[in-house]
Image (tube, rainbow, N blue to C red):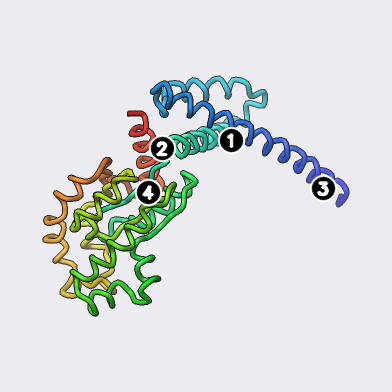
Amino acid sequence: MNMEINQLRDEIDRIDSKLISLFEERMQISKEVAAYKKANKLPLLDEKREKALFKSRLALLKAKHLSPYLEPFLETIVHLSKSYQFKCTTQKNVVLIGMMGSGKTTKGKLIAKRLGMTFIDIDEQIEKKQGKTISQLFQTFGSAEFRQIEHQIIQQLSTQKDCVISTGGGVVLDEKNMHVLKENGIIIFLNRDIEEIVLTIDTKDRPLLNDGAQILYSIYNERLPLYKKWCDIEITSNSDSIDEEVDIITKELFILNTN
């Protein structure tokens, strides 16, 4: 029995080796397709072709009982191809703005993973460099000085490429920040319902919420016009699933890259 299972595993290894080689070949062709699309101003996202592709590939399957497994396999391959094409043709950062509690860090990490990009959290970078938490920095230096520190970090990081950048909620208060981020980035506003944020946000280590979460309403009203002014894409949370929302965000990025 051990010999049989080892032989079967060897056969799987052999097939996996072929799959990896074919994957590399397919992604290289996808890169060439991306270059052609960019040169000829063709859309990165072509949902009609995708549907036709899925239908034709499923028709090739001899073991029809495997259809439920082939379809997500194909969907994953197509999504990876689009992600790679996006990265190859855009060469811009994806910058997430929005209120505290809007999910910029959680969603940003997932977006970065799906697009094959590096994730950067501005607040984490500030804390790492200063050796203090954001709350401590506000208490020590005050809001104005903190914004100067934030701007210095943003200037340093904005020169990097192929990054998904999660910003602090107040980044839009400094116009210089937004000019720097927009120069080499696509700005996405995560507009989560303020009622949900108030109900779910943890006020601990949130210097602006020392008097409670209710102050979020006035902060939101102050910043909303700025979020809308600077964003290229606005995403309104309407789903309980983070994965579904990330799907929507990546789709919007693919559509934006078409224009």
Q: CA distance from mark 1 to mark 4?
A: 22 Å
Question: Mark 4 — residue?
Answer: 241
The residue at the far bottom in this view is 140
Which callout, 4 or 3, points at the residue further toward the start of the chain? 3
Q: CA distance from mark 3 to mark 1?
A: 23 Å
Amino acid type, label 2? Thr
Earlier along the polypeptide chain: callout 4 or callout 2? 2
Q: Earlier in the sequence, mark 2 or mark 3?
A: 3
Q: Nearer the viewer, mark 2 or mark 3?
A: 2
The residue that appears at 44% across and 49% down in the rendered structure is 112
Nearer to us of marks 4 and 2 is 2
Q: Which residue is mark 3?
A: 5
| Residue 35 on image: x %, y % | 48, 28
Side (left or right) of 246 relative to 59: left
Q: Which label belongs to residue 90?
A: 2
The image shows residue 150, relative to residue 29, as above or below, that is below
- Horizontal side, residue 144 vs residue 102: left or right: left
Badge number at residue 91 = none
Tell me the CA gap for discs 4 and 3. Answer: 39 Å
C-alpha distance separating marks 4 and 2:
27 Å
Amino acid at the residue labelled 3: Ile
Q: Secondary structure at mark 3?
A: helix
Amino acid on which disc 4 is placed:
Ser
Numbered tag placed on residue 69 in the rendering: 1
Marks 4 and 2 in Cβ contact (< 8 Å): no
Task: Classify 169 as above or below 18.
Answer: below
Count neighbours of disc 4 (C-alpha within 10 A) and say few if under 14, some if 14 to 19, many if 20 or more: few
Question: The residue tagged with tag 2: helix, strand or loop?
Answer: helix
Q: Earlier in the sequence, mark 1 or mark 4?
A: 1
In whole angstroms, how far apart are the C-alphas of marks 1 and 2? 32 Å
Marks 3 and 1, the one that precedes in the sequence: 3
The amino acid beneath tag 1 is Tyr
